[in-house]
Image (cartoon, helix red, strand yellow):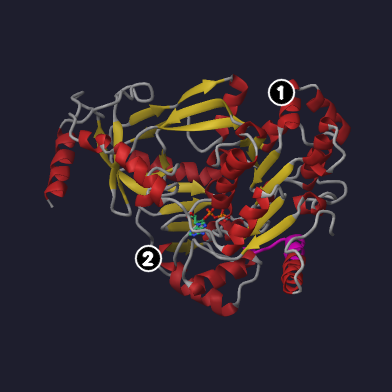
Amino acid sequence: MMGNRFLVIAITTYRNFSTKTGTKTKKWFGNRYRKKAIEKELVEGRTSIKWTDQQKQVISAVSMGRSVFITGSAGTGKTALIEHLIKTLGQKRYEPSNVFVTAATGVAACAISGQTLHSFSGIKHMKADRELLLQSVLSNKQACRRWKKAKALVIDEISMVSAKMFEDLEYIARVIRDVDEVWGGIQLVVGGDFFQLPPIIRPPDPLGKEFAFEADCWNSSFDLQVEQTQIFRQSDLQLIKILQGIRRGEIDPSDLECLEEVCCSKTKPDDSVVQLFPRIEDVATVNEERMEKLNNEIVVYTAVDSGIDKWKRQLDKGIAPDEIGLCEKARVMLIKNVKTWRGLVNGATGTILGFVEPEERDVTDICKDGLLPLVKFDSGQTMVVEPETWEVREGDVVRASRKQIPLILAWSLSIHKCQGMTLDRLHTDLSRAFGYGMVYVALSRVRSFEGLHLSGFDSSKVQAHPKVLKFYKNFVSEQYKEIEDDCSGKAHHISRGNT
Ligand SMILES: Nc1ncnc2c1ncn2[C@@H]1O[C@H](COP(=O)(O)OP(=O)(O)OP(=O)(O)O)[C@@H](O)[C@H]1O
């Protein structure tokens, strides 16, 4: 009680002596900083996940050097599992410098402290034919060194990698490493859900191939292809059923009715709810309008980047902005796991109460006012948000890093940017939705019906790509076959080369 009153007084004090007067708030949050060491200990104890049998199956296969493809619906813990596998590979099986962590996009790569698949591979123009690509990689010493050094290659968000790229990289790996095995003998750990956002292919592939699973070498690349089936993000069975239908491009009339009744008919949500848009222009407009409407003093945070220029460029593709202006009452979202055990994770939203001058550290490198935002998160927690670091790694070597406040404006986000996130509440206007998987990615971010506000919903935009449907139809039957095989005492995996 006393503590809360103190906080209110402190915030009021801050408001009275805001940056407008140049007077800085004094050290009233210092004791929180001293607790850091104790808190760190707690994180390590409390963030460990109790893996399911399906997840354990993958962990054990990867520990034995098997190449795996991990798929499953949104929220089945694919990325959480991949993060654990990266540590396992680097600590138990190889040296960290032999494990290369990549993802199809900059945002996804930054989320797992990796690099884009393009930057790892040294490939610049995917349109070029295979021999030209090989020549360009051979002329890039650093890229050749990476290919030769790699013992394990992790690729997250594989749905956005094209068949051509997957095939070309497999070929390049074999030739550069001079090992006549699939991927030149590199152990692969690949994750993603092909029902989510697809690759962008321009111009169209002459053979009509799009998805990585259409690559000739797809099946021979993996010892084990596993579909994770336990969904952690949502617990409401009806919502899970609806999302499963949308994932497969079908929506049962009764589910559509339920969705319209529960999510479309709600009164317009207040400004605290994140708005997801298919198009980036709509995102920027909403965030700018809301900031202007507040008309509060803006505190600017400018990222401090270090490393080599060409690596630093990847930081711009990540989620942490190079510059961001924040103000009191702005809606913000955490873009990094900060205090997982307190629910302050990537995607947590809140409102800025004010700004404080930290007692024990100088933050004038990223903010000339030397202030940190005090955020009240929607979960009820209030916290001074401290700067965080994002790294671009090549194996275990940090090539570039960005120090920035781990917040972005969160009145609005693009659906592309939120792939991989979990959100408590969202409003999505899907009237301008396009392409396969977009409706599913938007709706599957949320944990519950209560948190979902929907407008512009058009059931004809609920579409799954026919090739993806076919892939999973066969995939599921393959898994069933595996289970049957298991009952007869055979190994539970798809052997390399099995098609
Ligand atoms: N075994 C587990 N027990 C409890 N929670 C888990 C488990 N595995 C993963 N989770 C949690 O499930 C949530 C969703 O995980 P994650 O974001 O990795 O899913 P995902 O399959 O990668 O989703 P998306 O496809 O949307 O990116 C996270 O909060 C994660 O910590």
Amino acid under disc 2: Thr
Nearer the observer, 79 or 445? 79
Q: Does residue 118 show up magenta in the picture?
A: no
Residue 288 visible (yes or no): yes
Q: Residues within 10 Å of mark 2 (few under 14, many from 20)?
A: few
Circle 2 sits on which residue?
267
Front position in the image: 71 or 44: 44
Q: Residue furthest bottom?
A: 254
Q: Residue at x 75, y 46 (%)?
A: 162
Q: Residue at x 76, y 50 (%)?
A: 212
Which SS type dominates the magenta stretch? helix
Q: Image quadrant for the C terminus?
A: bottom right
The location of residue 259, given as percent across then percent down, is: 50, 71
Q: Quadrant of residue 121?
A: top right
Q: Residues within 10 Å of mark 1 (few under 14, many from 20)?
A: some
**In this figure, what is the number of numbered marks?**
2
Give the residue number, with chain letter if any, for mark 1: 142
Query: Is residue 470 part of the magenta span, yes or no?
Result: yes
Residue 131's tag is: none
The magenta segment is 461-472
- Left/right placement of residue 170 relative to residue 329 reads right
Q: Is residue 255 left or right of residue 120?
A: left
**Above or below: residue 447 compared with residue 315:** below
> Circle 1 — which element?
helix
* Kind of residue indicated by mark 1: Gln
Residue at image point 27% right, 35% down: 33
Q: Measured from the top left, where is residue 122 in percent x and y?
A: 73, 29
Residue 278 in view here: no
Q: Secondary structure at mark 2?
A: loop
Taking 19 as reference, is 224 above or below it?
Answer: below
Q: Which x, y percent locates residue 308?
A: 58, 19
Whole-percent x, y for residue 400 in the image: 55, 25
